[in-house]
Image (cartoon, rainbow, N blue to C red):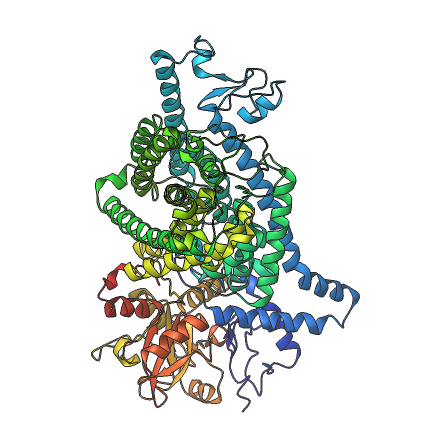
Amino acid sequence: MNRSGSQNIIDVGGGVGNSLGNTSDDDMVELEREGAPSTRPSGGISPPLDGSGLPEENIPGLGQYEDFHTIDWQRDIARDRMRHRLIVKKKKDSILELIRGAHDAWSGWLCVLVVGLCAGMMAGVIDIGATWLTDLKFGLCPSAFYLNKEQCCWSSNETVIDISGNCSLWLTWAEVMGFSKHESGAPAYMGLYFFYTLWALLFATLSASLVRMFAPYACGSGIPEIKTILSGFIIRGYLGKWTLLIKSVSIMLAVAAGLSLGKEGPMVHMACCTGNILAYLFPKYGKNEAKKREILSAASAAGVSVAFGAPIGGVLFSLEEVSYYFPLKTLWRSFFCALIAAFVLQSINPFGNEHSVLFYVEYNNPWLFFELVPFLILGIIGGLLGALFIRCNIYWCRFRKSSRLGQYPVTEVILVTLMTSLLAYPNKYTRMNTSELIYLLFSQCGVTNQEEICDYTNRNFTNVNQAVNIAEAGPGVYAAMWELGLALVFKMIITIFTFGMKIPAGLFIPSLAMGAIVGRMVGIGMEQIVYSYHGESLPWFFRGECAQEESCITPGLYAMVGAAAVLGGVTRMTVSLVVIMFELTGGVRYIVPLMAAAMASKWVGDALGRMGIYDAHISLNGYPFLDIKDEFSHTTLAADVMQPQSNEPLSVFTQGSMTLGEVEEILNSTDHNGFPIIISTESQYLVGFVLRRDLVLAIKALRNRMEDVSPDALVLFTTSPSTDSHLLGHNSLGEGGSNPVCPLQFSKIVDLSPVTIADKTPMETVVDMFRKLGLRQTLVTHNGRLLGIITKKDVLRHIKRMDNEDPESILFN
């Protein structure tokens, strides 16, 4: 008898699976054309109800993933390979198919091109908007209210502007209230103080309210979640349209409020939102989660590119910090995307100068060999400050989550903003925009500088390019160092409370500011040491490097190195950090000091805590992130970790002896994400693996097609001859013995080649398999017989347990 057509077998697979993993609907159609087994009847049996041609789109959601679940990298990559082979084969059929093949080949480049264009334009608009709102706290331009202070003063004919940057066309709020231009008494000061605090509270409250009401996912930096998503985790809505819109508006308000935060991390999040939205315009990426992450990696590079004007640093940041799967073609596309984004941003020119970098510096003196010692000291200080910041911030965020404070996010934002504005205004270094502070600290004192920090005695300039003579620090320098010390303490403490609130908040700029303050203070100290022992009294290691009566120390360089050190201590970045810093400042000749400080910072930080701030927040939120940089060195076996333990029953399906009712009973009584399939309860040899979601959707689609599906219908998970022989003698008739019950064929949603390991496999090997193959689960066998299953959550909890941490902190699979 013909086994393939001896009975009515209803095929509900939908053409989404084969021995390599689930395939697309196009793949299934092609397989049928090439000679799928005939289902025509043999003998006097009625024709079968064959549904093998059911396309994937007839089962909505098939091949997709549930929210807060991990994707199956191997399955998605296999689907894309089969889709690509089918397209290549069809290209020979017609010109239309050839054009479709060319479009498919170029769709990746086209997608990252559009992402780069959108990211550049979005960053330019946000930079311009944030600058205007920030200046609005201090005054306005009556002749053109839409201009910020710098643009307003460009319109004036004045050649000399006062030290605060004000001009006749720009009115402070004290002047709007009726005080004279040069009045600086207590009433004018209190008026400016009042408006500064009022605008800060208004901006922060509006930002927090927008996030709370319209897009809760728009809060925070976004980089911890981006890292988790790129590792294969699904967070529905995190990269959606509303998140992009609300975050782009609220980040401008948060920055303008004067809070200790930056917009660089949120820029990465918004660029990834753009990449996710545009990926759906290209089915190659929109319908495949693994392929979509190639676009998101390129988008994250574009985010850093526009945040700092650092395209190469953005690519390295994506590679080093956020991406999990980074093939060579993704490197090229990330470079192209970052290039386009930087070009668009430079065309908009939100920085308002001839340079495409944010903190352009140009020092007269090169760095000297003996300065490596203070540079390494700055690296050590940066590692210490970074480790301290991470511990304090995680402690506060954990307290926020476990206390009633977490129930009132807007109130928390208002209180922190009030405290920030009240304490920041009296100190001019905390009152000014953080980016302006960093630029000031990076700058070299010259003829145009009138700040206290450049108040040196007996230093006279006749032109900008002349050599800088060594000089004694005046009272203004010491006053500035005192104020900078207070600013460092203030920014350190207030950033601990700010990062993690329910508003968009990046950490790059505050970290750079703290490091720049430390570096500038160390640089001034080194400069005064050289001055105190100038000439023949200099120590031997100074004397050969420093010419008499000429300065050989550049405090601005120390600020730049200190900024890199603290940022490295907080994030634990190395290669990408150095490249970002020299692109950020244009200081290519200072790569070696930056490298030395970055490495020292990472060594010290890793000695005090192995996680950077982003990894610490991933762990705090319980995301299933398996870091490829960590090592697992414990001597446990797969049998020690697999589920179930202690002879507990394992929920399984048999390949051809279960009814639909029995299958649905197991689905309803368990919450497992997938089920192994074995030959029979007596012979527990492994056959395959089926996902809960695919099975539920297939059954739902079947009931939508056929209203009278009997729960007594036999469910077939394979098409092997043994299965057909088995069904010939069983379940051919209904309860009354007269109505035949058609078996249901589910083989096409079954993965017939799941990844398996032996029970004696070392867990070190298992962890490497999960990292490098991107597995969601692996099945444990002994001589081919199924023993249990190990999921990604089991691996993560086992690692936590071995590290004496709470395994229950891993919340998702």
- Residue found at x 75% / y 63%: 99
**Quarter of the view holding residue 100:** bottom right
Percent x, y for residue 245?
50, 39
Figure disc tally: 0
Left or right: residue 178 compared with residue 662: right
Percent x, y for residue 444?
50, 39
Percent x, y for residue 80?
58, 69
Q: Is residue 709 above or below residue 604?
A: below
Q: Is residue 725 above or below residue 595?
A: below
Kindly give the residue lying farthest to the front in the view shown. 536
**Quarter of the view holding residue 83:** bottom right
Taking depth in this image into account, of 666 and 734 the one nearest to the observer is: 666
Q: Is residue 582 above or below residue 346?
A: below
Taking depth in this image into account, of 292 and 205 the one nearest to the observer is: 205
Residue 659 visible within the image: no
Kindly give the residue lying farthest to the right in the view shown. 95
Percent x, y for residue 404?
22, 40
Left or right: residue 694 compared with residue 352: left
**Quarter of the view holding residue 207:** top left
Q: Is residue 33 above or below residue 810?
A: below
Quadrant placement of the C terminus: bottom left
Taking depth in this image into account, of 59 and 141 the one nearest to the observer is: 141
Left or right: residue 755 compared with residue 671: right
Taking depth in this image into account, of 218 and 802 the one nearest to the observer is: 802
Residue 603 visible within the image: yes
Quadrant placement of the N terminus: bottom right
